[in-house]
Image (tube, rainbow, N blue to C red):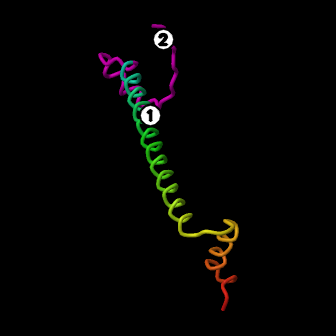
Amino acid sequence: MMMAQLTIRMPEPLRRQMKRFREVNWSEVTRKAIEARILLEMTRRQKDRHVMVEAAKMQDEIARILASRYTGPWSGVEVIRYWRRGRYSSWTPQ
C-alpha cells in the first residue's frame, strides 16, 4: 500500500516531550487517531441522517392529519402571516 506523507505543526514543548519517548511510533499514533476521528464523524453523520429521516416521517404524518381535518383552499403564506402577526406586539391588535 502506498503511503502519503503528512506534515503537521506543533508547539516545540510538545515536540520535546515526544522525543523523550523514542520507542513510540508517532506516525502510527497519529494514523490511529485520524482513523478514530473519521469513524466518529461517520457515525455522527449516520445518526444525523437517521434523525432527519424520522423527523421527515413525523412531518409527513402531521401534514396527513392536518389535511384530513381541513378541507378547502388555504394558503401557507396566510398561515405564516397570521402567526407572525400574533407574535410581534406591534402587529398584535389591541
Determine the image quadrant of residue 93. bottom right
Amino acid type assigned to the residue bearing label 2 in the image? Met
Task: Report helix, strand or loop for mark 2.
Answer: loop
Q: Mark 2 points at which residue?
A: 3
In terms of depth relative to the viewer, which is nearer, 80 or 21? 80
The residue drawn where x is 52% and y is 21% is: 7
Tell me the distance, in whole angstroms, between the alpha carbons under discs 1 and 2.
Answer: 22 Å
In terms of depth relative to the viewer, which is nearer, 40 or 50? 50
Task: Find residue 28 and report its horizontal and vertical position in percent.
Answer: 37, 19
In terms of depth relative to the viewer, which is nearer, 54 or 84? 54
Is 51 on the left-hand or right-hand side of 19?
right
The reply to whether dot 1 and dot 2 touch (C-beta < 8 Å) is no
Q: Mark 1 points at which residue?
A: 42
Q: What stretch is highlighted in magenta?
A: 1-27
The local crowd at label 2, few if under 14, some if 14 to 19, many if 20 or more residues have their Cα within 10 Å, is: few
Amino acid type assigned to the residue bearing label 1 in the image? Met
Is 54 on the left-hand or right-hand side of 71?
left
Task: Find residue 74 and report its horizontal and vertical position in percent.
Answer: 67, 68
The residue drawn where x is 46% and y is 44% is: 48
The local crowd at label 1, few if under 14, some if 14 to 19, many if 20 or more residues have their Cα within 10 Å, is: few
The residue drawn where x is 41% and y is 36% is: 43
Q: Which of marks 1 and 2 is in front?
A: 1
